[in-house]
Structure formats: structure tokens, C-alpha cells
Amino acid sequence: MTIALACRQLGKRFETVQALRDFSLSLQAGQVLALLGPSGCGKTTTLRLIAGFESPDSGEIHIEGRAVAGPQGHVPPENRRVGMVFQDYALFPHLDVAGNISFGLKGSREQRRQRTETMLSLVGLEGFGARSLQGLSGGQQQRVALARALAPEPALVLLDEPFSNLDTHLRVRLRAEVRAILRATGTTAVFVTHDQEEALSVADQVAVMSAGRLLQVAEPWRLYHEPASRAVASLVGESNFLTAEASGRIARCAIGELELRQPAAGEVTLLLRPESLHVTGDGPLRVEEVQFFGDHQRLQLRLADNTALTAQTDNSRRFRAGQRVGVKVHGPVLALTV
């Protein structure tokens, strides 16, 4: 597979803040990568370095095998073949929809018109070319911004928190549409988000970041089920952590003996996802809170030693605060050593 993007040991400092350090990853052509992490972790800095809005203090960036940043020099943003979709859309208010999409396109008037019509169809805005931006919803404006970024057929599209200004229902729908559009065009894309669900549902690869460092890069399923560390597990999905004593394939903890996925020895931290806990009848745990979500319930549980656990169940039974329950764990569990 062709490597569309390669970042090698990137570092960036802003005055006294080390925003990025030793950042390295590669992305195959046609894949979508999510940069996931809390505010201030370096996600946006990384995106700005790739776009060319900032220059790294150290390291290199290659786009489709071409060095665009590093010791060889700095290629300006307009010469990188990179499309950008901003959080606030950054559209031109004095231009209509077609004018925004065709802005920057090369070729004859007819070629630009045809390309614009193609992009309008791609993003589901046929017939909107002559519309002003003022009459568009937030979701429609974001589609215009995506069409504008894709129109010049860039090597890479960068999206900075593209759905954060939308309401929940529209955000869920639009991110599915954007994923489908990127798939249909075979576009390589990198997007920044702090939303775990968004990263896991849209991306082919997720890069988890914290304090300017890259903690792990993996496909969503592996990242969720096989996090490299407790820090990654905490940033991806909801987690229960229990201290245990491991011996081979067995670990002894506050809820009994549990089977391990891989052999371990000594003190370890067990990762238990809420959905892996099956809540049974009477037992030693106390239900402290019940949250109802329609298709499932989330229970806040407390062990006798005051350890807190979160369990997710279906709606086959109704639970109430104060009730005594037990738990069983589905399948072998992951032991984290770091």
C-alpha cells in the first residue's frame, strides 16, 4: 500500500510549552486517521504542522513520499495538495455555494463548473449552487466546506473538530455521511476530535495522544479491546480498573478469581469494560445509581471494600438504587502492567 502521510519524530514548542514531542506515524492512502485526546494534548498542533500552518522544530513530514517539512525546507500550505475543513467552516460569506466550492479550482470555466456540479452531487447538495450561505443550516455549510476541500482532488484532507458545532442528532448523521463520502472518493484524511465515539466510528486508525506524546495508534477494535496502557484505556471508552494478583492465567481481585487473556505474574491492573460485567441476583455489591438509556441501563455499583464499578446491562431486568447484586465477568480479561 502507498504511504500517503509519514510523520517522523516531530517536535514543536511554543515558548515554555512542549506541544509535541517525538511524534511518529504513517497513514496508508485511502485511510482515515483520527487524532484523539483531551484539550491541550497536541492534536491541533499536529494538524497545523501537517497543513503547513506551522513549522516543526524537529522531525520531518512526507506527503505521498514528498518531504514538505524538515531539514530539506518548508513547503507552504498552498503547495502541499492538502485540503482543510475547519471547525467554523471558514467559508466566504460573499460567495454563493458554487463560488465557495469552485474557489481555487484551476482549468476552464466549463471544467470548473462541471467539477463543482460533481462535488455538489457528491455531498448531497444538488441544486444548491446558487444559494447564499446565510440560508444554509450548519450541516449544509459543513458539506459545502467538505466539497470545497475535496474539489481540487487533494492528496490529503485535514478536518479540525468538523462536527463540534452541530447538535447531537445532526452530528451523528453527518459524520456517517462524511465517512461515506471519503470512502467513495478514496480520500486519505486526518481529523481531530476529543469525542471517543466519533473517533471509533469514523476512523480506520485512531492515534491516542496525551501531553504532546503519541500513546498508541491502532484500528478502533484493537484500541478498545487491547489498549497498550491504562492511560490509553482511560481515554478510549469507559473503564473499570481493579488491582489484582496474577499467577499464570488467573488473577485474584476484589470480585474473585478471573481468567486472564495472557499469562502474568505479580501485581497487575485489570481492565473491565462496563459491558463485560453481567449483573446477577443478590450479591455483595450495592447499586448506587441507575441510568436509563432506552436500549440499556448503566449501573454504578459499590463493593464492600468501597471499590466502585460501572456495569452496562440490557433492559431484561429492572434495577433500583440500594439493591444488592452480584457480578460475573464475560470472558478472559486484560491485565495491564503499565
Image (cartoon, rainbow, N blue to C red):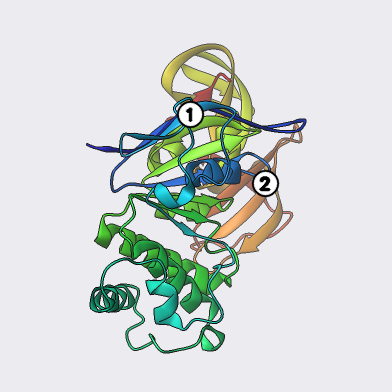
Of residue 330 and residue 47, the one placed in the foreground of this image is 47
Tell whether label 2 touches label 1 (CB within 8 Å).
no
- The answer to whether 334 is drawn above or below residue 29 in the figure is above
Give the residue pinned by disc 1.
Answer: 70
Specify the quadrant of the image occupied by residue 106. Answer: bottom left
Q: Which quarter of the rendered picture does the C terminus lie within?
A: top right
Q: Look at discs 1 and 2 and give the one toward the viewer.
A: 1
Label 1: few (<14), some (14–19) or many (≥20) C-alpha neighbours in 10 Å? some
Residue at x-position 66% and y-position 59%: 290
The amino acid type, in three-letter code, at marker 1 is Gly
Residue 38: x, y in percent?
Answer: 64, 44
Would you say 321 lies left or right of 45 here?
Answer: right
> Measuring 71% from the left and 56% from the top, which residue is drawn there?
289
Residue 219's spot in the image, x, y percent? 38, 40
User: Horizontal and vertical percent for residue 251?
Assistant: 53, 20
Label 1, label 2: how many angstroms apart (C-alpha)? 26 Å
- Given the image, on which type of amino acid does mark 2 rest? Ser
Specify whether residue 61 is in view: yes
Residue pointed to by mark 2: 39
Q: Is residue 247 above or below residue 205?
A: above
